[in-house]
Amino acid sequence: MVSASTAGRTGTRTSAAAVDAARAEGRAALVAYLPVGFPDVEGSIEAAKALVDSGADVVELGLPYSDPTMDGPVIQRAVDAALAARTRPADVLRAVEAVAATGAAVLVMTYWPPVDRYGVSRFAADLAGAGAAGLITPDLIPDEAAEWIRASDEHDLERVFLVAPSSTPARLRSTAEACRGFVYAASLMGVTGARATVGAGARGLVERTRAAGAERVCVGLGVSTAEQTAEVAAYADGVIVGSAFVRCLLEAEDRASGVRRAAALAADLAAGVRQR
Amino acid sequence: MSAVRASSDWPAVGGLAGERGPYFGDFGGRFVPEALVAALDEIDAAHREAMADPAFLAELDHLHRTYSGRPSLLTEARRFAEHAGGARILLKREDLNHTGSHKINNVLGQALLTRRMGKTRVIAETGAGQHGVATATAAALLGLECTIYMGEEDTRRQALNVARMRLLGAEVVPVTIGSRTLKDAVNEAFRDWVASVETTHYLFGTVAGPHPFPVLVRDLQRIVGLEARQQVLDLVGRLPDAVCACVGGGSNAIGIFHAFLEDPDVRLLGLEAGGDGVDTGRHAASITGGGSGVFQGSRSFVLQDEDGQTLESHSISAGLDYPGVGPEHAWLAASGRAQYRPVTDADAMEAFRLLCRTEGIIPAIESSHALAGALVLGRELGPEGVVLVSLSGRGDKDVDTAARWFGLVSDADLVASEAARVAETPSQTEGSGW
């Protein structure tokens, strides 16, 4: 799986390369999520670029979906607003192109129905054309992903599936084997959103996922502060933060101050992943 | 009849009726977060073991006979049939079950399964409130904790059912995100479940969602068709020409269709909620007015836009007001074994009124879609025809909606009834109430 090439398509930075570069510096990678279309498409591009400038190694751009069953209230609110403004897959591809131009690795995070509707093969081709490293698929398990596995192989895209504290050893193995890039370990059983503490089982899950064959394991869900980032960076290859950035944009009085707050948080968390 | 037990013969069934998922043709599967896979596997295993365990089946059978009132009656609707070309119309009376609909069949089975898995809490989604009330009922009976998710719009439209659930000891959580209706209640139940799955069973209400729910709920609803098939044979001496059932998610329809899948001469007709008419875009007809897609855990027919975003459904019947449908129906439609037609709000309400006045039975508005289908089909078949109709629920919950539809209450009464509502007046014309 993850031992596959980290070079990727010409000119496209992969998440594997970004994680490996962080590892070479003796630290974990910072992976930052933002949904495209909030506060609007240009605003989300501007914010994502600011996160890269402030130290995010990998950017996850969310494709808004009407029924985000894995997301808590913060991301739900942002996605609702993005959809109300008619954010479409073409907007997401445009955002990918703009953010990838910074040299950062860009993954698209998407629920499966929009990709299924777009056409898996066509979506893969357009993603590759826009310079995306690949996809994170929170509601697509490898068991259902035959078409996506074919298309991602064909277009040399990374595919990031999730593992959870409830995953059996057999499923950890099959998921690790199906992933390219890294394995996304959900730190706890629950939806996205800040928590007071990172799930106690996260470290054990990372260890079990590595034992199941994963070369790179990044941890997400519930991580929002520099302290938590440092804590997770001590045992994971990357730390994934989403809702905390979205909250900066949601709570800001205006776009510029929201971007400033998100960038300041990214700088904080970037320091966190260097404190392991 | 007494020999028929829920699903007790499923391992012996072959052919069309032997499909056990996860796929029905191209439909079904599990489009869910990895975090839920272990729990779905656990339910799948518990379901298989339970259905092969005589003690489990005996306990379920006992509850059916002594608690919910099975077998349900078969009633011939002679005066109603005069409006259906003279064909014989036979009503399978699920409306007479405890809690007023077929929902109790599924709920009792899953509640027993919850206990069998060692879980202590159930959660469920509800639209009109029927599945929520049935779940709260079974939870009270078996001493389980119970949380029901219900779109905020629906809690306003169905305030009495909210009160019923609370009387039964359930916590009712209004869902305030998205369109605030049934699909959002399902989303919120999944969010609860992913965090509570160790102690909690998601008591899914219909034959949709990820595997094994479509098969599990079908197996628990099959009793409707197993009973009805024998009852029709006993009464008429032959099988019916057609079986009519309304289809939202599709649990009562699968329940009554399933026993007839291997009877190729029996037409199976599912009636979808056509709302204002499929051509208006304001409907809930996923099969006749939607397309293939992934929605809430499985591949089936769904109402979605060109970007795969779920479209809002519209129906006077809250129980059919859902933009998806179970994958086994999608498969039966694609294969041609069953046909599906839309019935408009207006046609359903005419059938509703007709059954009230000709038979002294107030049907659920959901079931009235099936009655409207039977009227048309009866005229097609003529006096020699025999049509079996799933009367899936009773209409007590719909009296307010019907009174307004037919103008049976004065403006002053309406003002008083509005004032009595727990929340402010809901917006016009969505779902089962105004």
Image (cartoon, grey):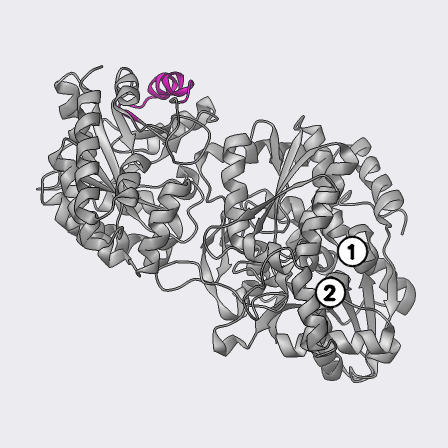
Query: x and y percent of residue B370 in the render?
Result: 70, 69
Residue B293 has which mark?
none
Residue at 55 percent across and 60 percent down: it is B322
- Tell me if I can see residue B374 in this picture: no
Query: x and y percent of residue A76 in the render?
Result: 39, 46
- Neighbourhood count class around disc 1 (C-alpha, 10 Å): few under 14, some 14–19, many 20 upward: many
Front residue of this view, candidates B346 and B110: B346
Q: Quadrant of residue B135?
A: top right
Separation of marks 2 and 1 at Cα, in angstroms: 9 Å
Query: x and y percent of residue A204 in the render?
Result: 39, 16
Query: x and y percent of residue B433 in the render?
Result: 63, 66
Q: At label 2, which amino acid type do we have?
A: Ala
Question: Mark 2 highlights which residue?
Answer: B364
Magenta residues, as a range?
A: A199-218
- Neighbourhood count class around disc 2 (C-alpha, 10 Å): few under 14, some 14–19, many 20 upward: many
Question: B196 left or right of B52?
Answer: left
Q: Considering the numbered disc 1 on the image, is that residue within a helix, a strand or a loop? A: helix
Q: Earlier in the sequence, mark 2 or mark 1?
A: 1
- Tell me if I can see residue A67 in this picture: yes
Front residue of this view, candidates B49 and B308: B308
Q: Is residue A246 above or below residue B295?
A: above
Q: Considering the numbered disc 2 on the image, is that residue within a helix, a strand or a loop? A: loop
Mark 2 and mark 1 residues within 8 Å of each other at the beta carbon: yes
Q: Chain of mark 1?
A: B
Q: Quadrant of residue B434?
A: bottom right
Question: Mark 1 highlights which residue?
Answer: B100
